[in-house]
Amino acid sequence: MKRRSLAAVLGWVAVACATTATTTWAIALLGQGLSRQVVSPMSHAEITQALAAATAAGETGGPPSPSEGAGGVSRAFTTPGGSVVGTCVTGQASLLAWSPAQGYATDDVSEGPGPYASLEFESENDKITVRITCVRGTPTMTLKEDGDRD
């Protein structure tokens, strides 16, 4: 009788270990498809470019000046929902980087290139739609704010 109980306990432990391993593997496999990188990392050149544009805007009080790199004209924008860096290359708008403000998340990202690039910054109460277009080769931002969403 003692051997039978020992065999039952060992069998139960083996099944529990196999179930745990299989479940962990399945969750890891499913998680790869469910999650995606929302914010793309910026290169050193992009960070320098965005900081220079943001600093220029803060010192002059005016809009940030566009900067031209090998990839075209880029410009950093700040909204209540977060920051966006847009670029124009051969008249096509693209998003280089974006970072939601605290309390906001990013949704519906259309990185471009195309006639426009866009994204939404969403919080519990607000939705801010950012759209980047190219006007005479320079990134230009338009905002649409929807407050008190329920």
Image: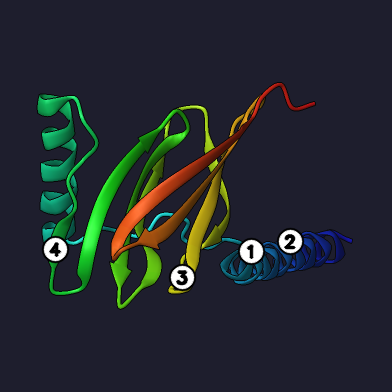
Report x, y in % for residue 99: 38, 44
Give the alpha-carbon distance from disc 2 to disc 1, as whole Å: 26 Å
Q: Which mark is residue 16?
A: 2
Q: The disc labelled 1 sits on which kind of residue?
A: Leu
Give the alpha-carbon distance from disc 2 to disc 4, as whole Å: 60 Å
Of residues 26 and 102, the one nearer the viewer is: 102
**Helix or strand or loop: what does disc 2 sit on?**
helix
Q: Which residue is mark 1?
A: 34
Which of the two discs, 2 and 4, sits closer to the camera?
Answer: 4
Image quadrant for the N terminus?
bottom right
**Helix or strand or loop: what does disc 4 sit on?**
strand
Q: How is the image coloured?
A: rainbow
- Marks 4 & 3, CB-CB < 8 Å contact: no
- Image position of 34 (left or right of 80): right
Nearest to N terminus: mark 3 or mark 1: 1
Nearest to N terminus: mark 2 or mark 3: 2
Q: Which residue is mark 3?
A: 112
Q: Which mark is residue 68?
A: 4
